[in-house]
Image (cartoon, rainbow, N blue to C red):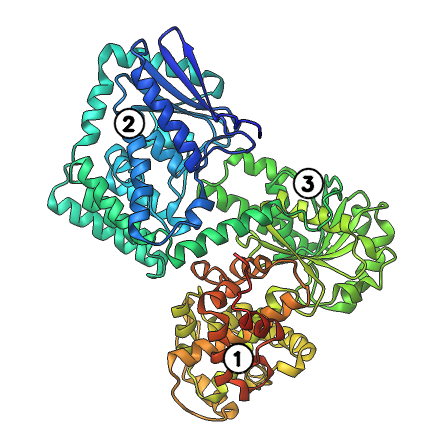
Amino acid sequence: MGQPTQPALRLEILNGDIALLTLDQPGSRANTLSQAMLGELEAMVAQLKARAELHGLILCSGKPGIFIAGADLRELGSAPQDADTARKMVKRGLDLVASIENLPYPTVAAIDGACMGGGLELALGFDYRLAGTHPKTEIGLPETKIGLIPGWGGTQRLSRLIGPSLAAEMICSGEPAKADRARQIGLVFDAVPPERLQEEAVRLIQEARKSDEWKTLRQRKRQPVGLSEEQQSFAYAVARAQVLAKTSGKYPAPPAALEAIFRGCNLPLEDGLKAETEQFVQLVGSPISRNLIAVFFMTQRLQKDSGVNAATVQPTNVQQVGVLGAGIMGAGIAAAHIRRGIPAMLLDNASAALEKGIGNISKSLLGRVEIGRLSPADAATALARLSSSTTLNALADRDVVIEAIIENEEAKVNTYRQVEKLLRPGAILASNTSTISITRMAQSVEHPDTFAGMHFFNPVDRMQLVEVIRGEKTSDETVVSLVALAKRIGKTPIVVRDCPGFLVNRILFPYLNESLVLLQEGASPRALDKAAMAFGMPMGPITLNDLVGLDTSLYAGRVINTAFADRAAPTKILDELVKAGRLGQKSSAGFYSYIKGSRGLDDPALDSILAKCRTGQRQFENEELTDRLFLPMLTEASRVLSEGIVRDPGDVDMGLILGIGFPPFRGGILRWADALGLANVLEKLKRYESLGLRFQATEQMRQLASEGKGFYRD
C-alpha cells in the first residue's frame, strides 16, 4: 500500500465563523491549479457552502512568495486539440469560480506573492482581493505569452473590474502588476504589509457583512460594462492597432483576447464567458501554443541548470568582479553587475575611455529611472557599487575578472599574462570574446582550469543571453560559478563547448552568408529582409549586417568561414562595401542609407557595388528565399548538437531565440524542423544539394528521419 496523498488545502476557522483556507501544494515550491488541485477545491467549496455557521471565507497561500502560479502548464501543453475536450477543461474552471461567487457570504483572496493566470482568475471570483506588499507579489494574466488567453473568465471579470481598455492592455501584454499598481487600478481592494493580510481580510469581511456591499459587487460583476457602441468600437480599434504593431500578426492569442474582451464586455457575464470560451478553444493545443509552452519549459530548465551534469559541484562565492575595458561592452557588463548588487571595478588604461564608460553607465541608470524601472535611490546605490581604475593592480582582490577589450587575440593574450599574476588563487578569468578560441587562449595562462569564456550580447542591458564557453581544460567549478554569476545578474546562461563562433554566431553565420550568396545571384536586399521577417525574424539579414557593422561582419565571418571552409560560400560583397567606406548604420551607409536618422532607405549608390559582385539576375519565390536562409542554419544546428557543443536541443533553440530573436512562436530552429517533419526537411534539402555541403542533411538528421523521430523526444 502506498502512502496516502497529502492534501493541498488546510481549513481553519477564525473567530468562530470565518473560514481560512490555506493552499499549500505538497512536494512543490509553487501552487498550481492542476486537475488534482481543482478536484480538492471543488470538494472544499461544496463543503464550505453547506456549513451554515460560516459568515466569510479567506483564501491564502502557505508558500512564501507564491500565491498561485496558474494552471499546470504540463497538462495544458499536452492537452488534446479537439474543441470538445478543451470546452470540458474550461467548463471545470468556470464552474469552480462560479461556485465561489455563489457562496452565501463575503469572500476575500489574500494574495501574498505571485498570483498569475488561473490563480488570478480564481481570485477574481472572490468579492475582494487584498495584496501583500511582498517584493515577489505580482498579479497578472500572462496566458498570451504561451499562445493562449485566459479561459476561466479572466477576460470578462477583469474587464468589469478595471475597464475593458486597461484589461486589454494587461492581458495582451501579459505583464503583471505589483501590489501598489494593482491597488491603483482597482485590481485589488488594498495593498498591505504581509503580516497584516489576515487581520485586514477579517476586518474587510466584517465590514462587508455590515454594509452588504459584497452583494452589490456580485450583482455589478454579472452585468454588461455598458460602453456605448461608439466607445466600444473606438477602444477595440485602438487596442487592435497596438497589438498588431507589436506582434506583426504572428501571434494569434492577443487578437483573440481582444475579441473575447470587446465582444463579451457589453453582454451579461454568462454570455461574455461564452464569447471567451469560443476564442480559447481555438488556441488550446495549437502548434503555436505548444511551441510557446515548450519555450517556457526550456527557459525553466535553463534557470535550474547548474551548467554541468555533476550535481555535487558548487559555485564559488563571487562577492566582487572586475571588468577590463570600458567600451560599450565593458561598461554594459559592469552596469549589469552593479544593478544586481554586485560591486564591480571598471578598468581601462585610457582615462578618457574610462570616463566615457562611467558616463555611459550613469546614463543607463538614469534612463531606467526616467521610465520608472528604477528608483532614484536604487540608481544612486547601484552607482555607489562601481569603482574604477587605470592600473591592473586594482584587480588583485576580485573573485572574477571579465575581459572585454578589443577583439584581437594577441592583445587579449598579453593582457591575461599580466592580469593572472595579480589575481588571488582560485580567481576566475573570463573573456567576453565572440569568436576567438578559449582553448587556444588558455594556453597563455598558468591556470587554464579557471579560464573560460563569458560572452555577453550587445546591448548588454537588453540582451538576456550569456554564452559560458568551456575550454578543453576549464573546470566544472569554473563553469558552475560563471553560470551562477550570470543568473545573479538576471541573465540566461547557456554552457557551450569551445568551437569557432561558439553557439549563436556559428549558427547565425550560415544565415548571413547565404543572404550574401543570394544577393550575388540577383536577389534584392529588401526582398531578403522581407522574407526573413515574414518568417518571424525581428529584422532581416541585410539590416542585421548593417546594424552589427559590415567591417565586424566581414572579419568575424572570415574566422568562421575559414574554420568551416567546406560549407562556406565565399562572396565579395562585404569586402567591396567596406572598401567603399560603407560600414552600415555607424557610417550612415551600408546596404541601406541611414541619412538623417532614417531606419534604412534603399540606396541607388549600392547598385554599382552589387553589379561588380553579381553572378546573375533573377526573381526568387519567397519559399526559396526562406529555404535558402534557414536550411543552412538548421544543418549547422544539427552539427552543433551532434558534436556535443551543447548538452540539449533546448540549448540550441533558446540560444537562437535569446541571441538573435529567432521567432519564439516557432519554438526554435530544431522545433521548427520537427514541426515540418524531418522527412519533409530532407526533401527540401535535396532541391538545393547542388549548392554545396551546407544544404546536405547531417547523419543525425537522416537517422532521425528514418526512425520517424525529431530532435526532441516529446
Please tell me in which quadrant of the rendered image residue 648 appears.
bottom right
Residue pointed to by mark 1: 514
Q: Amino acid at mark 3?
A: Pro
Query: Residue placed at 40% from the left, 58% from the top?
Result: 288
Residue 370 point in image, percent of width and height: 45, 43
User: As drawn, is 523 to the left or to the right of 388?
Assistant: left
Decide: marks 1, 3 in contact (CB < 8 A)?
A: no
Q: CA distance from mark 1 to mark 3?
A: 43 Å
* Residue 352's disc number: none
Q: Specify whether 41 is left or right of 520.
A: left
> Where, by quadrant of the figure, is residue 69 drawn?
top left
Does 703 sit above or below residue 454?
A: below
Does residue 644 appear in the picture of this structure? Answer: yes
**Percent position (x, y) of residue 511?**
53, 74
Residue 26 vs 345, above or below: the answer is above
In depth, the one of 480 and 389 nearer the eye is 480
Return the disc, 2 or 3, that comes first in the chain's sequence.
2
In the image: residue 657, left or right of residue 233: right
- The mark lying in front, picked from 2 and 3, is 2
- Residue 536 versus residue 312: which sits nearer the camera? 312
The residue positioned 46% from the left and 93% from the top of the image is: 616
Report the amino acid beneath label 2: Ser
- The residue type indicated by label 1 comes to Glu
Q: Residue furthest top?
A: 16
Residue at horizontal 61 percent and vertical 47 percent from the top? 335
Q: Outermost residue toward the left?
A: 229
Q: Which residue is mark 2?
A: 99
